Amino acid sequence: MASFNSLAPTSEKQAPGKTGLPVWMLGLGNGHWDDDIFRLLAFLFHQGVLDEQFMQLHQLQDESSPNFVSEVISIYFRESEKLLRNLRALLADQECTDYRKLGCHLNHLVGSSSSIGANRVRNVCVAFRAASERYNRPGCLRSLAVLEHEYCFLKNKLHELFQMEQQRVMVAGVRYQPLI
């Protein structure tokens, strides 16, 4: 079955302009129902929301595990919700903030975000961890707000991407034919 990477041309032609993205990633030359998926992916990569690890994750999906990526992403979001809840709880207590626990939760979130290619979430976690290492409560509170924003943005965009992929598969009339 076709995978996202197999749809790429063998030559690594770059798109004109400043994006630096391969032409295939912009959806040029693909079917109409693929264009929206490619545009969204190009946007997410160009904005730094996702990195190459996201594509490597997709390479692990095949016909024997057609829902692999969506399952991994679902686990990521479920576990991340717990970590965000813990971070909020630690910072809610104005008298006593356990910066060591903050760092542990952030290390976990950095690792899981890196493993799925959630680049901007990972970067915010790194800055958040630096603020916690300096016992900088205002910096931690600001970082938490930015982290929650980036996390929600990522979650919404990946939900949109998976919905488009499901629609594409339904239109194609096949059980498994991943584009990404």
Image (spheres, rainbow, N blue to C red):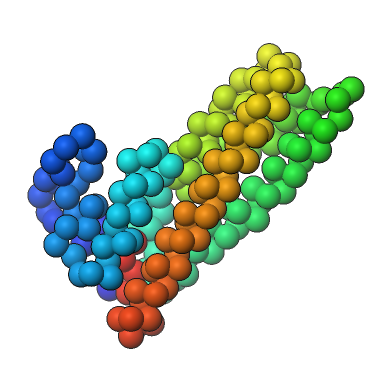
Q: Position of residue 140 (x, y in %)?
A: 69, 25
Q: Quick check: can you spot residue 53?
A: no
* Residue 125 image position (x, y, % from top left): 58, 32
Position of residue 73 measured from the top left corner of the image (x, y, whole percent): 53, 57
Res. 178 image quadrant: bottom left
Measured along the vertical axis of the image, is residue 59 above or below residue 50? below
**x then y, percent, for residue 51:** 38, 42
What residue is shown at x 24% (from left), y 52% (from top)? 25
> Which quadrant of the structure image shows residue 63?
bottom left
The answer to whether 137 appears left or right of 67 in the picture is right
What residue is rendered at 69% in x and 36% in y? 105
Which quadrant holds the N terminus? Answer: bottom left
Query: What is the tally of numbered marks visible in this picture?
Result: 0
Q: In terms of image quadrants, where is residue 57?
A: bottom left
Which residue is at the far top? Answer: 134
Residue at 42% x, 73% y is 166
Residue extending farthest right:
95
> Does any portion of residue 114 appear in the rendered image?
yes
Q: Please give the name of the residue rendered at 62% of the width and 41% of the height, measured from the top-left corner.
A: 148
